[in-house]
Amino acid sequence: MRVHFHGAAGEVTGSLHEVEAAGHRLLLDCGMIQGSPEAERRNLDPFGFDAAALDALVISHAHIDHIGRVPLLLKRGFRGEIHAQEATADLMRIMLLDSASIAESEAERGNRKRRPGEPELQPLYTRDDVEATMQRVRPLRYGTPREILLGVQVTFREAGHILGSSVVEVRAEGRTLVFSGDLGPKGTPILRDPEPIAAADLVLMESTYGDRLHKDRAETILELGRILEAAWNDGGNVLIPAFAVGRSQELLYWFAKYWDEWKLSRWKIFLDSPMAAKVVAVYDRHTELFDEDAVAVWKEKPNPFNLPNLRLTESAQDSMAINAVERGAIVIAGSGMANAGRILHHFRQNLDKPQTHVVFVGYQAEGTIGRRLVEGAQWVRIHGRDIRARAQRHTIGGLSAHTDQHGLIEWYGQIAGHPPLALVHGEDKAREALAGEIGERYGVKAVLARPGLTLQV
Ligand code: ZN
């Protein structure tokens, strides 16, 4: 077997690894490059291999930086099957349709401003392309080996990162390649911990937080409770920008778990994100993937997705109606970094009030409104209007969906014999720090994968 690196090799997004095995070619992930507009333009570049010559695609999980270019792969001639864990397959449709809608409306907007003679903008792919993509998806359970091509066997193992997230084992020619996908921290709510891997001949491991240690999750949760108490006493609303997959559901889980302690029955809770509501339905369909704690919460507490005072607002009208609530509302809405989405109209309505509390539960990238607020901006521009930002702001660390340096070292360390290791899905600073630690501890010299590099398994 041989692995060729094409994407997320020296950066975090755009996961794309090609494997030659038993005379076939397969791809692990086909993710979107995300970040600045310049970076995102690279999504249009050629893949670096012939899409039509690929025999199969294997998906680690449904985050857009791992699946975002799959419909493009089909547009460029890929005709093989797509193998994904069952919940990943369900989430994929939601994520890709959303991604296609955004691409379609951006192209439409661009074309309206187009000068005569300029070429018409085309979306990266359309919702029809997504439907064609989903026809090729073959869902697969954890722990069930499948011969995806003659002489090539694939098994998914729990990765504990988002629902359906998988570590991918590829067996061919008597060798085993293990691709970590993205690894969650132990104790991620609802999900089981990453499953230990017995053995491998080569490991591709993510390294997003290879140079960082996370704050304790239990401490983080106590902090959230204290913020809600303070917000109630101030008599305002609480606004939480959150990603539709994972973080939104996790918040509802904590609300159910601490229902009595945090006196949550006095609040009105809104999950104001049609996409997050669709994702909730996928969680509900896959309770077989829940861990013991989640099973207990579902049995003993109010159902996190059906809290008596929770409203999932679908229509734009219902979302606007939340504006009439002056106090006592907790609003979870996208986008997670407040650079788009419904959270913005809640900001317009509430940000100028000192009794409003804004709680940031995820990473806020440079250049986003979320980042500006975290850094203490007094004014932000929303929908073309300058808004005075007098709300109180809180940043809750410790809810990351990625494990930290300790977790990565521990996951790799339990693989028998400490096989050769290549680090992907991380910036160089993170990868170098992680490679240094692993070298010291296990005497293994980790390879920092780069586009164009080939490794023998
Ligand atoms: Zn991910």
Image (cartoon, grey):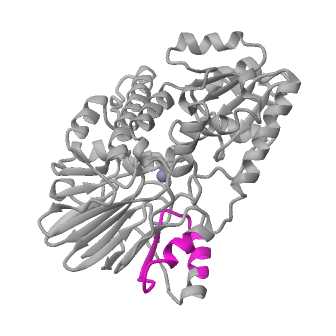
Q: Which of the pair 220/60 is nearer the observer? A: 220
Q: Is residue 299 visible?
A: yes
Q: Position of residue 162 (x, y in %)?
A: 48, 49
Magenta region includes residue 97:
no
Q: Position of residue 285 (x, y in %)?
A: 39, 36
Viewport quadrant of the C terminus: bottom left
Left/right of residue 229 with respect to residue 130 in the rendered view: right
* In the image, residue 350 above or below residue 81: above
Left/right of residue 96 with respect to residue 244 in the rendered view: left
Left/right of residue 366 with respect to residue 420 in the rendered view: right
| Span shown in magenta | 408-437
Viewport quadrant of the N terminus: bottom left
Q: Which of the pair 286/442 is nearer the observer? A: 286
Residue at 77% across, 39% down: 225
Magenta region includes residue 427:
yes
Q: Position of residue 70 (x, y in %)?
A: 30, 46
Residue 2 found in image quarter = bottom left
* In the image, residue 322 above or below residue 91: above
Left/right of residue 51 with respect to residue 452 in the rendered view: left
Q: Position of residue 395 (x, y in %)?
A: 75, 44
Q: Is residue 384 visible?
A: no
Residue at the far front: name it. Answer: 300
Q: Which of the pair 310/401 is nearer the observer? A: 310
* In the image, residue 411 above or below residue 301: below
Residue at 25% across, 72% down: 171
So how many labels did they put on this image? Answer: 0
